[in-house]
Image (spheres, rainbow, N blue to C red):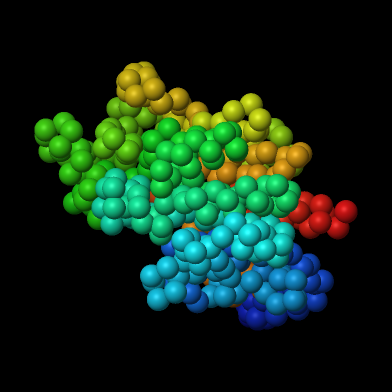
Amino acid sequence: MLNRKFIIGILVLLVCAPIVSWIIWNSQTIRPIGFTIFDKRVPQKQAIFHQALNWILNYNKFYKPDNTPFLPERSVKEYAPVKNIAFSINSVKTTKSELYKKTKYIDFAYFTELPCEAPSKTPFPTKQADYLHPFNTFTGNDYTMLTLLKNEQKPIITEGNFITHFINYKIQGLYQKQFGIRWTGWCGKFFFSLDTSINKEIPKWITKAYMLQYKKRWNYKRSGIVMVDTNNRIFVLEKGKQLEREVPMIQSSKYAIQKYNLPDEIHYPTWFYIMQTGEQNNVVARFRLYTNKNGDSILRQYSIPKAFPAIIEHTGDYTYYHFAADFSNFPSHFSFSKLKYIDFLSPLFYKRNYSEKDMFFWEYYIPLMTSIFNKTIIHNKK
């Protein structure tokens, strides 16, 4: 009898809990925010690459100024391609005055990562044609829009490779001087297995680039990190041989832990970019590679530090953040964003699997972006 009552109670709880959770979420006060997502990767009415961002906006009831939600399929703004041919903001006919008018409707701008695969099938453009393609590069209009937003003191977030693929060196120099941030040309990614017979997600261009450089076959079997740069140089850090810990970690500063409610450390398994920044900015979190003496020697050979910026922040005269990886690209279930307190159950939605990004989304990206949005709304009310 006791077991039967217990089972019935559990079933009732499972049925009622989501309903109660939705009622609480639905009763929350809407918080309007003039937020704009700039994404070059997706066609109109499709936003799979920044679903995580839409999830957080909806979960916290951050709505558009007209009190409508940021639905994934309707959130892509200026970069939404017209028949996959042109982007309005990258049109050669778009003037600075027209861009300035657009900034008047933006309270907060988020520039997502550029297309991860250029036509040359690498994580960055390597052919001249790739660099000249406005879909794949940081253009003059991108720089103008960022400058206008900065001058208007509108909060800005850029992430991943958005600022790594400049259409020319002039734009690159202007940006670096303006925001005090620079890409070294290196990026890397963790693979749970470097054995191509097991892990089919290892891109073929990686093994081809390796064989061209070292004149030998790819013969790695363990987990590890692959590092590549714009000069087609490549090297591998393998668990047990060059790595003490197999996966890159993001380590938060004490400042970040307190201000953004972040954990002190979390693993990050997807592509990351090695950035540099000046004294004008604050590095609130860093990537850390746990290499042994053999790994240290390889990093020194290529002038790569063991720790480098993951989150760069500038506050005061203007507000700017750069995430040195594609943080917003996570296939979250949008319907779950309507269940209040579901984040307390987050350990049920992920395994502590180094090859998965789930834990990063629940434990790191959600509190980070929620804190940034909350502070933006408070600032806008002043």
Image quadrant in which you'd find residue 77: bottom right
Can you say whether 289 is above or below 136 in the image? above
* Residue 108 left/right relative to 186: right
Image quadrant in which you'd find residue 300: top left
Query: Which residue is drawn at the image coordinates 44% and 62% (left, top)?
Result: 41
**Considering depth in this image, is 72 or 100 the residue closer to the camera?**
100
**Considering depth in this image, is 201 or 77 the residue closer to the camera?**
77
* Residue 265: percent from left, percent from top: 58, 38
* Residue 194: percent from left, percent from top: 26, 43
* Residue 227 left/right relative to 148: left
* Residue 61: percent from left, percent from top: 73, 69
* Residue 29 left/right relative to 314: right
Can you say whether 155 is above or below 79 in the image? above
Query: Which residue is drawn at the image coordinates 55% and 45% (left, top)?
Result: 323
**Considering depth in this image, is 281 or 356 the residue closer to the camera?**
281
Image quadrant in which you'd find residue 315: top right
Q: Is residue 41 visible?
A: yes
Can you say whether 117 is above or below 255 in the image? below
* Residue 362 left/right relative to 60: left
Query: Which residue is drawn at the image coordinates 64% and 76% (left, top)?
Result: 14
